[in-house]
Amino acid sequence: MIAEGGLAALWLAAAMSLLQLYLGAAAARASAEAIDLRPVCVVAVAQGTLAAIAFGLLILCFLRTDLSVALVAANSHSAKPWLYKFAGAWGNHEGSMLLWVTVMAVAGAAVALFERRLATRTLSATLAAQAAIGLGFYGFLLFASNPFNRLNPAPVEGNGLNPLLQDPGLAFHPPTLYFGYVGISIAFSFAVGALLTRDVGPVFARAMRPWVLAAWIFLTIGITAGSYWAYYELGWGGWWFWDPVENASLMPWLAATALLHSVTVLATRDGLRAWTIMLAVVAFSMSMIGTFLVRSGILTSVHAFAVDPRRGAFILGLLVIYIGGALTLYALRVSTVKEGSRFDLFSREGALVVNNLLLSVILGVVFVGTLYPLITEALGAKISVGPPYFNQAAGPVALLLAAIMGMGPLMRWRRDSVRALLNRYAVPILISAASLLLAVLFAPDAGVLPLVGLALAPGVAAASVAPMWKRNLRRTPLFTWGMVIAHLGVAVSLGGMAASTAFNKETLTALRPGQTTHVGPFEVRFESVAPVAGPNWTAMEARLTARRNGTGAPVALAPQSRMFSAPPTPTTEASIRTFIDGQLYTNVGESDEMGRWQIRLWWKPMVTLIWLGGALIAFGGVLSLLGRVLRERKAAGGRARAPGADAIPAGGEALA
Amino acid sequence: MRKIRPILWVPLLAFLGIAIAFAVQLAQPDDRAIHSAMVGKSVPVFALPAALPDRPGLASTDLANGQPHLVNIFASWCIPCRAEAGPLAELARRGIPIDGIAVRDRPEDLAAFLAQYGDPFRTIGADNDRRVQLTLGSAGVPETFVVDGNGVIRHQHIGAIMEQDIPAIVAAWEAAR
């Protein structure tokens, strides 16, 4: 009955989204005085609740390993640890699509509950748009990817979950990523709503900003966590592979990052109206295109669960309707939106425009690189596009972007002078020059990109915290703190990427127990191998002892070569030790007939900074969001007492 | 409404272009095989030693002797290679010369394999480090190339040759004459 209950909840949620579309559209047409938002808001909340119930029931099916449900039988196993039964609910195509519509419905419900600034007509149009997108994906679930299908007769045992997914990372990475990836649909719906009611301006921008910020925070956390997960789970020691799915999550992030900055220009200076709307449409379009690319099977990827051309055709249809519809609306309506106020190019607005352009260039580079194999295949040649293209094409732009990022917050709104800026920028430039000198001295053949990265990172870090210089830190608004910390995070992450690339050391050897080898500053002794067993796997575990410079305190490492029982799949479990200045990363492979074991070791200096930076970026976002919400509260309270108390001085509105 | 600005329609047109490319791609049958980039080119220069004492090894010069050849890449440890033994024997019976490249094999295993599953090969070269296999653009075993009399690769068959593949192989061989 649980599966039937879930299916019923899903159908009801779909019906609610239809009702929400109708009520929202009707309310958006009514005259301003006659609008009653309550019905559409109630329906939106009901839809969100029903979708969440359907998802909860699917999780229950997985927790109970109800093998009469086809999806459970295909992806779960009774002997699996409970965490993976739970998380396995979304470790497959149907379940992850249910998570997709659930996030979309819950995000819509959140807008209905909490959005109070947006003009009522725009809000109802936004809710209608959110329902319209939801409807298509409900259709996709119910007609092409039903997660609640029954099996008759039920099998005695399930197929098990892909061992690569049997990791605590599965419990956190997909949901956080989806909250961002799908949550950005709110920005899309806001844009459509605003185009429909021709209501694009600072009020709209201030209303949209927290939602974009929230989705962006989740997206940042999801990407950072996914990068670390791939790093330790896949056992290749890399932290970004330019896999189509990684790109599919990076592209909405790039668009959302650009949107976050352009929406600030719109909120503060009433500029970049048409551009901001475009970015809002593009961000979620990238999410949908990414989903299509991965789920249709036209690109091969580690994340491809289901390869079914009919599903691909269904999603492609949805893409054409939603993206095509939004872009048509854009073309028809945006010329009637008045372009906002003008500004001098050499100003903070100008820096933000450059930020947007550079982010768009990176987005374009990633987009082209991801789709290029499709285009050449249509012309008859099979190629794949890998890291050499992406690093060379996107790397220099990203470095330039980081440099501009350091400069932007030091610039004044409206108009600034080169001389004044140089004054403020003198210290960071000196720091960068010094670190370039050091980098060239210590790593002369690290390659141009890592060298420039090493040079830039400290300078950008200094420039990022510079806005706090001589400020009363206790009176600095929380969102300014957020910006400073997020920018600092970018510098930290950049430093980690550059240092781990420039100073990476790798050793691949075949050793007998008792032998020693070296990697970076470490002397590593191969002590022994022993068989070990887990709940649903067996493994050969190599025991290694590493000593820094051969004399330091012994550090134990125990990489495993695992064999999972269901489905029978070998995996390598890397053993990683974190030091203050980097990570020691080890793998064990197979043994040869002479009793030697393949052992692979990496010394990755400063590699942890990459994810620490990502965490800082997300934390900055959280502070910024908190700051905005608290100030909103205060302003609302102040408004009640004295109208006009919330008037924001032009310079006080900092970056989100 | 004001006059229509063409530039505003560019995003829509670009998206529709991409959507059409997607649709074309979806409509195409799924083809996961990656064919060698060497098809249509001369075989790279190589000279493999004999894998068995009773017959010669294989060199690229042997292939450019005016006669079309089949070059079968196989190994005694390769299970699908057993399945294609019958069809290979049938091709040999029709008078098609078949040269073998044994990948990472040992003479005693190879001899046992041929004794058990049949032996259609005129020559067998020993490719112990897979270098020749890789330069031919072959990613696995078994694979079969049709090489014409000038030593130019005309056709590549990936995977075991089954009964139903025989006509296509014969046709490719006939075309290479």
Image (cartoon, coloured by chain):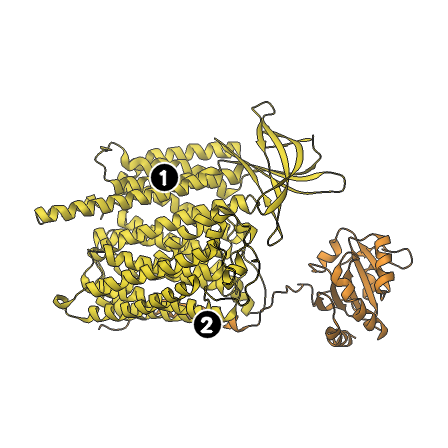
Residue at the disc numbered 1: A488
Q: Indicate the position of residue A471 as horizontal and vertical percent values.
A: 23, 33
The residue sitting at the left extreme is A642
Work out whether A223 lies above or below A616: below
Report the front residue among A59 and A193.
A59
Work out whether A17 lies above or below A525: below
Residue at the disc numbered 2: B20
Q: The N terminus of chain A lies in which quarter of the figure? A: bottom left
Q: Indicate the position of residue A44 as horizontal and vertical percent values.
A: 27, 62
Residue A509's quadrant in the figure?
top right
- Disc 1 is placed on an element classified as helix
Q: Same subunit under labels 2 and 1?
A: no
Rounded to the nearest whole Å, what is the CA distance between mark 2 and mark 1?
Answer: 42 Å
Which chain letter matches label 1? A
Q: Is residue B80 left or right of residue A363?
A: right
Chain the render paints yellow: A
